[in-house]
Image (cartoon, rainbow, N blue to C red):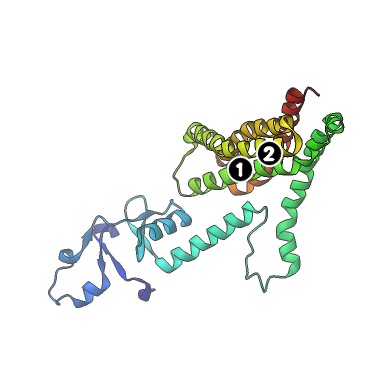
Amino acid sequence: DSEDLVVIPVLGEHRRLVGTVDSIILMRAAPDTIVRDITEPDPVFAMTGDGDEQAARETLDRGLLSLPIVDSEQRLVGMLPIADAARIDRQAVDEDHARAGASERLRRSYIVTPVSRIARARIVWLLVLAVSAILTVNVLEIFEATIEQQVALALFVPLLIGIGGNTGSQAATTVTRALALDDIELRDVGRVAFKETRTGLLLALPLAALALALGWLFYGLGIGAVLALTLLINLPLAATVGGVIPIVGRACKVDPAVFSTPFIATFCDASGLLVYFTVAITVLGL
């Protein structure tokens, strides 16, 4: 629409984009002004193959009032106004939040969306998570004898798998966003894994110190040591897997935001329990 074109594209031969001109400057220019003299050369633009979200993010990040869209031969095919860019970006954020919460984005306002539609948007991933929880139950059954010998170990299961799951989810959210913004590529998987391993270890240090102190105070040094060692092993592992899984999803042509949530929940629960009880058996001699 003409009212959206605060910035007007300037075209050369064959509709090729050569610059832009501010509509205010154009309206105030003398009738005999040559357009070339008030044109801003080398404008920022997006390609038709870049995708809506990338073009919208480019518009918003650079604070542009509108962004030219060109084809592979630099020919103008349209303009993306900032209002449309904001709408596209908001929809993308809504989808990311919904998928990160194991749900689907609602197509209408929450208030007017029927309850059946809301339930349908959530049930699929709840079923996936429910089925994956069977693996966690199986792990608990394996270590049932260990729990019977040291009942205090069972008290910390929700805490440890919760911290591990949150660590993995935080890493996945960060990497998924970086993938969406093209900050990282598939070839960066090694760098991402190394960075998240170090991040997980850095997160584990203060938490392990706190767990050691509180466990020692209330349940003895052995329990405190088990908790601390579990966190030192589990958090770097959870962060690394959480960071790598979205990249694996992208490589498999699966939406990383959808792919990550159920897998990370299952992995962090199962691996966290395996690490926890293995450390407990080793340290406590069970």
The quarter of the rendered structure image containing the N terminus is bottom left
190 left or right, relative to 286: left
* Residue at 49% from the left image edge and 60% from the top image edge: 89
Instruction: Please state which amino acid type lies under the numbered disc 2.
Output: Cys
230 left or right, relative to 94: right
Circles 1 and 2: CB atoms closer than 8 Å: yes
Residue designated by label 2: 268
Q: Position of residue 150 (x, y in %)?
A: 83, 32
Q: Position of residue 21 (x, y in %)?
A: 24, 66
Q: CA distance from mark 1 to mark 2?
A: 9 Å
Task: Give me the disc on residue 167.
Answer: 1
* Residue at 63% from the left image edge and 57% from the top image edge: 98
114 left or right, relative to 91: right
Residue 215 image-quadrant placement: top right
Q: Secondary structure at mark 1?
A: helix
Task: Decide which of 285, 62 is in the foreground and name it.
Answer: 285
The quarter of the rendered structure image containing the C terminus is top right
Instruction: Please state which amino acid type lies under the numbered disc 1.
Output: Thr
